[in-house]
Amino acid sequence: MQATFIEPNTVVLTLEGEFDALAVVDARPMLEGIVANSDSDVVMDFSGVDFLDSSGIGCLVFVFKRLYAAKRTLTLQGLRDQPQRLIQSLRIDKAIPTRPVGAAA
């Protein structure tokens, strides 16, 4: 996962490959640091993600709740294929905003 800070007060996290249990173990320290140590909104870019599992969903919900409590936002960007279908079937897109790649922050 790569983090890019953009204006105004937004960090874009670019994910690649699979966002599964192994990826969550690697991503969680960075996510917790961003949530705890900045006042930025977060955009998670899923345009390079081919697979999302329950661990990835749990991680998204964890980050969303922490940001929401701090009056900050989480946006999922570039969802496609299996991750998009899973997010829609679980109706997560009703709570966490989604947008296509390249949409304004």
Image: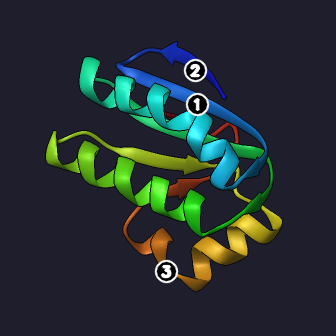
- The residue that disc 1 covers is 13
Check the image and report above or below for 19 versus 15.
Answer: below
Disc number for residue 3: 2
Q: Is residue 88 left or right of residue 78?
A: left
On-image quarter of the N terminus: top right
Residue 97 locus on image (x, y percent): 45, 58
Quadrant of residue 36 within the rendered picture: top left
The percent position of residue 85, horizontal first and vertical second, equals 71, 76
**Residue 24 badge:** none
Do the residues bearing badges 3 and 2 touch, measured as CB atoms within 8 Å? Answer: no
Specify few, some or many for label 3: CA neighbours under 10 Å numbering under 14, 14-19, or 20 or more: few
Do the residues under discs 2 and 1 have CB atoms within 8 angstroms? yes
At mark 2, the secondary structure is strand
- Nearer to us in this view, 23 or 86: 23
Residue type pointed to by label 2: Ala
Q: CA distance from mark 3 to mark 2?
A: 26 Å
